Image (spheres, grey):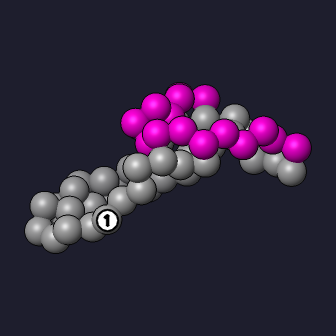
Amino acid sequence: NVGKSLHEADLIDPAKALMAKVEIPLPTDVVVATEFSDSAEAVVKPVDQVGDDEM
């Protein structure tokens, strides 16, 4: 779940194909917020717990 983060939906399948062929280290935790601004409260959480309203 990428929540509200920007992503390119047409590149999901090529990314999955690439990941099946090589080992790519991915983070286990991320910094998220509900809006993109200087005053947004940032929270660190496991990558699998990113909410639909977070980026």
Residue at the spot 53% in from the left edge and 29% down from the top edge: 51
What residue appears at the point 22 percent right and 56 percent down from the top-left corner? 16
Range of residues picked out in magenta: 39-53
Relative image position of residue 8 (x, y in whole percent): 44, 55
Q: Callout 1, which amino acid?
A: Pro
The total number of labels drawn is 1
Judge by depth and name the residue closer to the eye, 43 or 16: 43
- As drawn, the residue found furthest toward the top would be 52
- Picture coordinates of residue 44 (x, y %)? 60, 42
Q: Residue furthest right?
A: 39
Q: Is residue 21 visible?
A: yes
Classify residue 17 by image quadrant: bottom left
Please identify the quarter of the rendering in which residue 40 is found: top right
Q: Is residue 54 magenta?
A: no
Q: Is residue 5 left or right of residue 19?
A: right
Residue that appears at 11% across and 68% down: 21
Q: Nearer the viewer, residue 25 or 6?
A: 25
Whether residue 14 is visible to the viewer of this picture, yes or no, is: no
Quarter of the figure that contains the C terminus: top right
Q: Which residue is mark 1?
A: 25
Which element type, helix, strand or loop, lies under badge 1? loop
Up/down of 25 relative to 45, above or below: below
Residue count near mark 1 (Cα–Cα under 10 Å), binned few <14, some 14–19, many ≥20: few
Which residue ends up furthest to the left in the rendered image? 21
Q: Pick the residue in front: 42 or 6.
A: 42
Quarter the N terminus occupies: top left
Give coordinates of residue 43: x percent, y percent.
66, 39
Residue 48 x %, y %: 40, 36
